Amino acid sequence: MFAKVSKVLLLVAGICALSTIAWAGQPFDAKTFQASQAAGKPILVDVTASWCPTCRQQRPIVEQIEKERPDLVVYEVDFDTAKDVLKQFRVQYQSTLIVFRGAKELARSTGETSPEPLRSLVAKAY
């Protein structure tokens, strides 16, 4: 009985721990991206790679900006697997951030890891 309870507690603890991990954005999906564009929403496309140290530095900043601007829609593009999306956005490097307001691209940045320039970048959509 104790072994079963221990396993359940470990499972619950693991689920709780995973739920506290914040990930910036939602996975890129062309249809939802187009719907966000059609609605005229402020959009941030975050091109990232799990192995990229610059991307890891950007992540908490992007997460904080999401909290500060709840109407901002953030799409995460995996640099290693989404080659068609990279081509669509003309992206050559991971750690690229692209800001849109509706269908119009307003700004982009590659490799920036300071909070204020990234906030300024996103502010162009407002």
Image (cartoon, grey):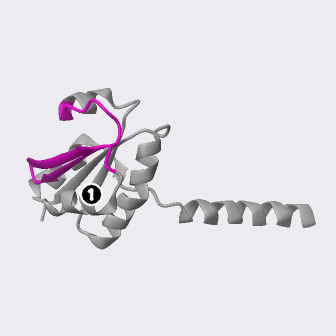
Quarter of the figure with the C terminus: bottom left
Q: Hey, which quadrant is residue 87 in on the image?
A: top left
Question: Which three-letter amino acid code belongs to the residue tagged 1?
Answer: Leu
Spot occupied by residue 41 in the image (x, y as percentages of width and height)? 15, 60
| Residue 96 belongs to magenta span | yes
Pinpoint residue 33: horizontal percent, then vertical percent. 21, 48
Counting every numbered tag in the picture gives 1
- Where residue 67 appears, as percent x and y from the top left, is 34, 70
Q: Please tell me which residue is depicted at 31% across the width and 33% down the height of the picture.
A: 93
Would residue 1 be visible to someone looking at this image? no
Point out the stretch of residues depicted in magenta: 88-112
- Quadrant location of residue 20? bottom right
Give the image location of residue 35, x and y in percent: 17, 51
Secondary structure under tag 1 reads helix
In the picture provided, is 73 more to the left or to the right than 126? Answer: right
Give above or below for 72 relative to 59.
Answer: below
According to the picture, the residue beneath numbered tag 1 turns out to be: 118
Seen from the viewer's position, the closer of residues 34 and 60 is 60
Residue under the point 37% across and 34% down: 79
> Residue extending furthest left?
104
Query: Looking at the image, can residue 70 be seen?
Result: yes
Q: Tell me if mark 1 has few (under 14), some (14-19) or many (20+) residues whose alpha carbon lies within 10 angstroms of its own.
A: some
Residue 102 magenta-highlighted:
yes
Q: Please identify the quadrant where the N terminus is shown.
A: bottom right
Residue at 31% over, 49% down: 112
Report the side of 22 relative to 69 (left or right). right
Residue found at x 29% / y 55%? 74
